[in-house]
């Protein structure tokens, strides 16, 4: 990938995720492209710093720690039980990468409802591959079958997502959204505000609860919410990742946490790309296996560490 270009990645009282088919490792190039990323000199995550501190005060600490690692992290958190809402730059747009697969699945189900017909077995199987393992080929199949960019327009309208916009190049991974809109999407999905029936909502949530630790492209996709909250046994997540946008990694971790989907959390990060060899190009995650890429691992660890600093006990509540 050329520096600065966009390319596809594989791919809590408002708390509101990517995959790509890849060639074998022997087609990637020399090992210099996988050099371990530079890291911040300070401990991360600095749990001791935030232990015993109220969430309101932990937020700026986590943001500062991520920034020291070269990352800007934005998020929104919703407690659906109490209505409590926490946010930081929740209105900043970010490329969705594979998180837009949520919108594709939503439209497939809504279209079937509107036409008073069951979802085909083929569409259900394709949706499962797309949401559970973040399979990109599955996403392309449904994207073109159900209207490509028009999917984003219709879903955004149904859910009132005012900062979610279709991709200029008609590529689903370049859809743009915000943490706030993603929280709004999940909240609307769960309360029926977006038009899906309870049965349709349960299809999506059920698939998100089956999120595979390793995506179709080999990427470790449980960074952020899952790895950062080891004490939470119930979660339904969709992750996103891609490189490179303006010389930065993009990662998203989104979903629901807890019994009855009590919490909704959406995080997005843009992190500087560090390689010790000053390489001339960055990995095109649409065609290159980046599962072992040092800079990608550093960015995943940043988002997981950010969650750990928000919730040092490993649970949201």
Image: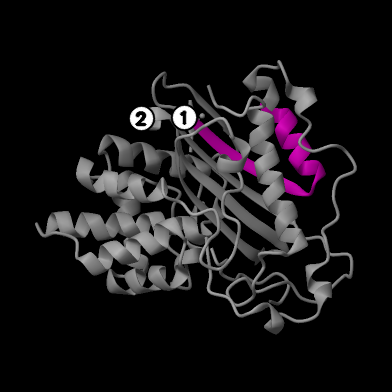
Q: Which residue is mark 1?
A: 78
Disc sitting over residue 41 in the figure? none
Count the labels in the image: 2
Q: State if disc 2 and disc 1 touch (CB < 8 Å).
A: no
Q: Is residue 301 visible?
A: yes
Q: Is residue 37 above or below residue 71?
A: below
Q: CA distance from mark 1 to mark 2?
A: 13 Å
- Is residue 242 left or right of 273 when viewed as pictured? left
Q: Quadrant of residue 103?
A: bottom left
Q: Residue at 35%, 30% (x, y): give it.
A: 260
In the rendered structure, which segment of residues is drawn in magenta? 59-77
Q: Position of residue 20 (x, y in %)?
A: 53, 70
Q: Residue at 71%, 15% (x, y): give it.
A: 52
Q: Secondary structure at mark 1?
A: strand
Q: Is residue 36 above or below residue 30?
A: above
- Is residue 249 left or right of 294 when viewed as pictured? left
Q: Secondary structure at mark 2?
A: helix
Residue 283 magenta: no
Q: Which residue is mark 2?
A: 260
Most foreground residue, 280 or 213: 213
Badge 1 or badge 2: first in the primary sequence = 1
Q: Position of residue 224 (x, y in %)?
A: 60, 44
Quarter occupied by the N terminus = bottom right
Residue 74 magenta: yes
Q: Position of residue 49 (x, y in %)?
A: 79, 24
Most foreground residue, 161 or 28: 28
């Amino acid at each position: 990938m050329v520096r600065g270009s966009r390319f596809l990645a594989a791919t809590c009282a408002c708390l509101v995720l990517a995959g790509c088919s890849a060639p074998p490792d022997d087609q990637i190039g020399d090992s210099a492209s996988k050099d371990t990323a530079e890291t911040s000199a300070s401990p991360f995550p600095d749990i001791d710093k935030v232990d015993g501190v109220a969430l309101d005060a932990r937020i700026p600490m986590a943001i500062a720690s991520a920034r020291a690692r070269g990352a800007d992290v934005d998020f929104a958190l919703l407690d659906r039980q109490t209505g409590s809402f926490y946010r930081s730059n929740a209105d900043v747009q970010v490329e969705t990468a594979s998180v837009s697969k949520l919108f594709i699945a939503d439209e497939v189900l809504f279209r079937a409802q509107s036409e008073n017909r069951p979802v085909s077995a083929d569409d259900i199987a394709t949706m499962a591959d797309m949401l559970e393992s973040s399979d990109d080929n599955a996403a392309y199949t449904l994207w073109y079958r159900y209207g490509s960019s028009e999917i984003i327009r219709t879903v955004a309208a149904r859910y009132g997502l005012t900062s979610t916009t279709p991709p200029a190049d008609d590529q689903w991974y370049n859809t743009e959204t915000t943490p706030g809109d993603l929280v709004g999407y999940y909240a609307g999905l769960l309360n029926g505000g977006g038009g899906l029936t309870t049965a349709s909502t349960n299809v999506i949530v059920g698939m998100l609860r089956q999120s595979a630790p390793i995506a179709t492209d080999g990427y470790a996709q449980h960074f952020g919410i899952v790895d950062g909250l080891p004490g939470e046994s119930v979660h339904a997540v969709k992750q996103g990742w891609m490189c490179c946008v303006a010389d930065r990694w993009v990662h998203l971790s989104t979903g629901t946490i807890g019994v009855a989907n009590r919490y909704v959390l959406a995080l997005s990060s843009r992190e500087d790309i560090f390689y010790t060899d000053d390489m001339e190009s960055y990995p095109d995650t649409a065609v290159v296996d980046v599962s072992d890429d040092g800079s990608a691992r550093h960015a995943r660890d940043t988002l997981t560490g950010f969650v750990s600093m928000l919730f040092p006990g490993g649970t949201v509540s």
